[in-house]
Image (tube, rainbow, N blue to C red):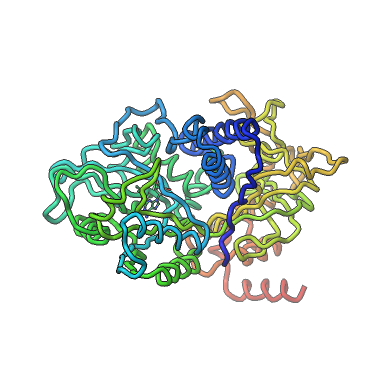
């Protein structure tokens, strides 16, 4: 699949225009960083973020006087939250330069060779490994014992999340094996599998709590908890891929270092390989991209790193990223289309879940015609008290919207293009009665904030057929009784036929009744 290259900026700007745009981009990037890193609640897609950063960089290349003047020019991430004690990283936690196509990867390799003064054919090895879409964490081991775990924060100062990291099964409290240096900082990514993310959101929904937008936010929200008990209840995972302070060298190559991490009991990504030519690096990228949906966790590209650590040292860093590494991003999993209708599904707990019916569009190779609009607050853009809400969007039928797919999670509507909104467009009127049973549907007041919930719920309880069906589906699902082979269609058929109304009815069913109901439905 061709990677979507962010808009190549036309830089026909006067100095004054460049200054204005630079300031605007810089502010937008800083705000996006804050929402992403501190609130775990991004409002723009990763692709849009990359576009902003590239435009900023292009302006700085053309107008070097502007470099370093904006809020976002050299920052990585965002300042650590006041909620946590701070940890100053002994070695800063930096970011990676991005490439969006094969040409840019070739430029990177050529740049490395040029910097080293090497000819085009001198053998040069690179590792290639998935870029995990989670949050980075630095683990400081002293004499083999985990002493501190810190988030990246702004790259210089992170948040102390040691108590939380100790609850993560993948992170050993004591390093296994032998040979680790007295001080050994191991860095990597904390992430959640798709299955665990879905289970956490199902629990959030059942408890009437806001849902996480994607596994990355759920992982960040789970690790950055004041109560380690909550972190412990979320099955976070970890892959080690980098290091900070080491009191003695541990290997001569990147690949050798990863091997040692594995020997000491840390998970390293099994798709890491070493190559000496660009074609093989790109081949690995294409294989990983093709297998992406089946991995069970989110990745957003492949990272190439010069394997030889002595060369890494010579290459060093430029501004916020190493010269010896590059993130080759996957094609954006987003597209633009039109909302043709908005319909409401009723969830197991009675939540009225709005769904956008879209003009079909291909997103990352899959045709999408439905996308979630999350809840009433998201669609209307205002709370029940009429006040704007932070992640609200004001999405209307007829709107041109950006649709985003992340891993195998249901597509969602991210942004509205207001310039394309039809002149006669009307705000979406959310139903105040349940479309399944006609009962009143209400937005309860959240006792913590004193404001109405973003979610409207049906008050019909047991009389609501939609809630009944959804409860039964949950009961047989993997997160419930895990009744194998008992799919959602069976539940719908049995419910419609009046044979199963509550979980206990399932255990009274005999095979003949079940078969007759399925056949009758097929013939109907
Ligand atoms: S190496 C000095 N390797 O991507 C650079 N980073 O955009 C060290 N990431 O902050 C980073 N997977 O949170 C590296 N295999 C990988 C990665 C990876 C995910 C994240 C990491 C980093 C960000 C940079």
Viewer-side residue, 472 vs 44: 44
* Residue 410 shows up from this direction: no
- If the image is split into quadrants, where does the N terminus sit? bottom right
Counting every numbered tag in the picture gives: 0
* Residue 313 shows up from this direction: yes
Residue that appears at 16% across and 50% down: 249
Viewer-side residue, 312 vs 184: 312
Viewer-side residue, 295 vs 8: 8
Residue that appears at 48% across and 44% down: 217
Q: Position of residue 105 (x, y in %)?
A: 45, 61
Q: Position of residue 189 (x, y in %)?
A: 36, 49
In the rendered view, would you say 494 is above or below 29? below
In the image, 424: left or right of 43? Answer: right
Residue that appears at 21% across and 38% down: 147
Q: Position of residue 6 (x, y in %)?
A: 59, 52
- If the image is split into quadrants, where does the C terminus sit? bottom right
Viewer-side residue, 212 vs 105: 105
| Residue that lies at the very extreme toward the right in this rendered image | 424
| Residue that lies at the very extreme toward the top in this rendered image | 450
Q: Position of residue 240 (x, y in %)?
A: 30, 53
In the image, 428: left or right of 106? Answer: right
In the image, 519: left or right of 138? Answer: right
């Amino acid at each position: 699949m061709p990677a979507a290259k962010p808009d190549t900026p036309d830089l026909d700007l006067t100095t004054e225009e460049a200054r204005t745009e630079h300031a605007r981009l810089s502010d937008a990037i800083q705000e996006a960083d804050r929402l992403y890193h501190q609130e775990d609640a991004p409002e723009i897609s990763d692709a849009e973020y990359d576009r902003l950063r590239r435009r900023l960089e292009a302006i700085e290349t053309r107008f070097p006087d502007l470099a370093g003047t904006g809020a976002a020019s050299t920052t990585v991430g965002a300042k650590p939250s006041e909620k946590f004690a701070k940890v100053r990283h002994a070695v800063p936690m930096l970011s990676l330069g991005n490439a969006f196509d094969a040409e840019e990867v070739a430029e990177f390799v050529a740049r490395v060779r040029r910097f080293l003064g090497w000819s085009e054919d001198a053998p040069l090895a690179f590792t290639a490994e998935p870029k995990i879409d989670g949050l980075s964490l630095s683990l400081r081991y002293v004499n083999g014992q985990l002493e501190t775990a810190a988030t990246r924060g702004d790259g210089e100062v992170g948040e102390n999340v040691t108590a939380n990291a100790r609850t993560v099964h993948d992170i050993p409290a004591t390093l296994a094996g032998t040979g680790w240096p007295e001080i050994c900082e191991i860095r990597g990514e904390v992430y959640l599998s798709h299955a665990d993310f879905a289970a956490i959101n199902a629990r959030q929904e059942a408890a009437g709590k806001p849902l996480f937008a994607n596994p990355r936010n759920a992982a960040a929200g789970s690790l950055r908890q004041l109560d380690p008990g909550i972190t412990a209840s979320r099955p976070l995972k970890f892959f080690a891929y980098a290091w900070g302070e080491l009191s003695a060298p541990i290997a001569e190559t990147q690949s050798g270092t990863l091997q040692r991490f594995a020997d000491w009991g840390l998970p390293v990504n099994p798709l890491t390989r070493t190559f000496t030519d660009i074609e093989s690096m790109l081949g690995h990228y294409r294989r990983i991209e093709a297998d992406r949906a089946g991995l069970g966790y989110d990745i957003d590209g492949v990272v190439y790193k010069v394997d030889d650590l002595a060369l890494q040292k010579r290459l060093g860093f430029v501004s916020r990223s190493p010269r010896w590494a590059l993130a080759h991003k996957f094609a954006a999993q987003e597209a633009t289309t039109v909302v043709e209708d908005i319909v409401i599904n009723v969830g197991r707990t009675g939540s009225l879940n709005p769904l956008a019916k879209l003009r079909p569009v291909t997103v990352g190779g899959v045709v999408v015609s439905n996308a979630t609009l999350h809840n009433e607050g998201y669609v209307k853009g205002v709370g029940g008290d009429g006040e704007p809400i932070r992640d609200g969007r004001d999405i209307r039928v007829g709107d041109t919207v950006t649709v985003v797919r992340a891993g195998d999670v249901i597509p969602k509507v991210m942004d509205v293009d207001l310039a394309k909104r039809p002149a006669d467009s009307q705000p979406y009127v959310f139903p105040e009665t349940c479309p399944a049973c006609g009962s009143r549907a209400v937005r309860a007041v959240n006792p913590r904030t004193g404001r109405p919930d973003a979610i409207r719920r049906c008050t019909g309880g047991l009389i609501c057929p939609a809630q009944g069906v959804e409860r039964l589906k949950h009961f047989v699902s993997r997160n419930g009784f895990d009744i194998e082979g008992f799919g959602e269609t069976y539940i719908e058929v049995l419910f419609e036929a009046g044979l199963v109304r509550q979980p206990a009815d399932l255990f009274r069913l005999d095979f003949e009744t079940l078969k007759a109901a399925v056949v009758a439905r097929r013939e109907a």
